[in-house]
Amino acid sequence: MKNDTITASIAEVFAPLLTSNYRIKFYYGGRGGGKSYAFADSLLIKGRMQKLLIACLREVQDSIKDSVYRLLCERIAFYHLKDYAIKENKIINRITGTEFIFKGLRDSDIQKIKSLEGVDIAWIEEGQSISKKSWDILAPTIRKDGSEIWISMNREEENDPLWQLLAAHPDERTLVVKVNYYDNPFCPQELKLQAEQCQKQNYDDYLHIWLGQPIKSSNNKLISPAVVRAAFEPKNIISHSPLIVGLDIARFGDDRTVFCLRQGRCCHKFISLEHYDVVSVADYCQNIIRDYQPVKIFLDAGGVGAGVYDILVSRGYRRLIRAINFGSRAIADDRYYNRRAEMWDNARDWLSSDLAVQLPNDEKLLDELCSVNKSYDSKGRLLLESKDEVKKRLGRSPDLADAFVLTFAEPVVEQSPPRPPDSIESLFSDNSNGKW
Ligand SMILES: Nc1ncnc2c1ncn2[C@@H]1O[C@H](COP(=O)(O)OP(=O)(O)O)[C@@H](O)[C@H]1O
Ligand SMILES: [Mg+2]
């Protein structure tokens, strides 16, 4: 078995384990993200290329059975790596001389820790359990030039020591990557089903176990999953309210541009575009105007959104398009820290209303809507955590939710252009996502 055959089975997010030099490689996320497998496979590959001392560490290791020893043995067997010899307490490579050793940190006496001084790579599994004391002893011990510390963990609490010390504000020698089951191309169907079941039954558990969010962080969420689920239930809402479009425009290569089409109590659909430049987004928006005749389009004016706005204005849509700056002053400035908090709270209000509302059933939308934490500033105004925090937790930008909340940017009083009452419904009835 050649190394490149193993490499091919390592998901892309884990490629930096093999290809980049960082002092700390910190991978975190929920169950099933592929962290343990990728770490094991990557270390086995590295150990075949040169002589390395690899320490597999955890806070407590009563017996070697607690460690990743078994996983490494399984992967060696799976790939038929005959150059590895499995010993009682360690694994060695007969050709390169690489050695894997296994230790618990909590009960290690100073002599045992000293034996780590020649370590090339330390893999800390279950990093959320590592105490500050263990870290303070370990970090200076892994001192060989070019040595690396790899950490895999699922966050337990907001202030897990390793999270706080290494990942909350990473320096340039630290790589921090979030990975969840849906990022893992090898995630077994059974695990995905378990995740989906948990998502339906106990959303807080789901956020922690499967999305890697710290426990207890859900008390201060702005929007509860229950109201979103209620909005997912199919209803037959015929709305004659004007159609409003929210447009969240991609800032970076990995974000999507999303249109959200909402008419009163019915949010009809989302249209996501990837890799569209500003002119193409403006063209697309013009098609939406032609086909759906919205009375207002609210677009996110941050980043490249301003460019799309300028193009649409130059094409004669000044009255139709409103550029919204999320960071600007709220309309109800006494109640909201900024426009973003105001729009999100209007959306929460809409979802919590006594009247039935309809949202397209989309689990990603639910995750995004329910992941934002709220707090209050010194004037008692509603304040949302930063988008960067949300992104870090969610592992992506909440584009669907942002497009949706944009439809609540301002009250729209204009009447719909005259059209037969049911014709707008027929526009949405074909489910033509990506019609253009
Ligand atoms: N490279 C891989 N090849 C085959 N299956 C994989 C691979 N990586 C992950 N898996 C599958 O995904 C599951 C979850 O991976 P695991 O490494 O245990 O995730 P985590 O440590 O993030 O919880 C594994 O049980 C295995 O079935
Ligand atoms: Mg694991």
Image (cartoon, rainbow, N blue to C red):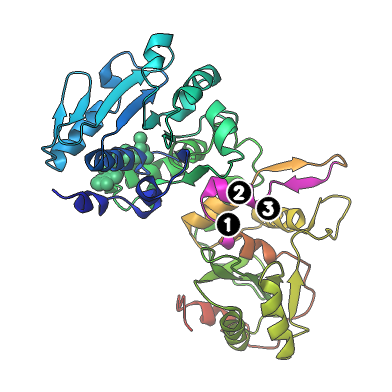
Mark in the foreground, 2 or 3: 2
- Helix, strand or loop under label 1: loop
Q: Is mark 3 within 8 Å of ligand 1?
A: no
Q: Are marks 2 and 3 in contact (CB under 8 Å)?
A: no
Q: Judge whether residue 359 can be spotted in this image.
A: yes
Disc 2 from disc 1: Cα separation: 8 Å
Residue 84 percent coordinates (x, y): 15, 33
- Helix, strand or loop under label 3: helix
Residue 144 percent coordinates (x, y): 42, 30
Which of disc 1 and disc 2 is earlier in sequence? Answer: 2
Crowding at dot 3, Cα within 10 Å, few <14 / some 14-19 / many 20+, comes out as: some
Mark in the foreground, 3 or 1: 1
- Tell me the magenta residue range: 380-399
- Which residue: 63% across, 61% down? 402
Disc 2 from disc 3: Cα separation: 17 Å
- Helix, strand or loop under label 2: helix
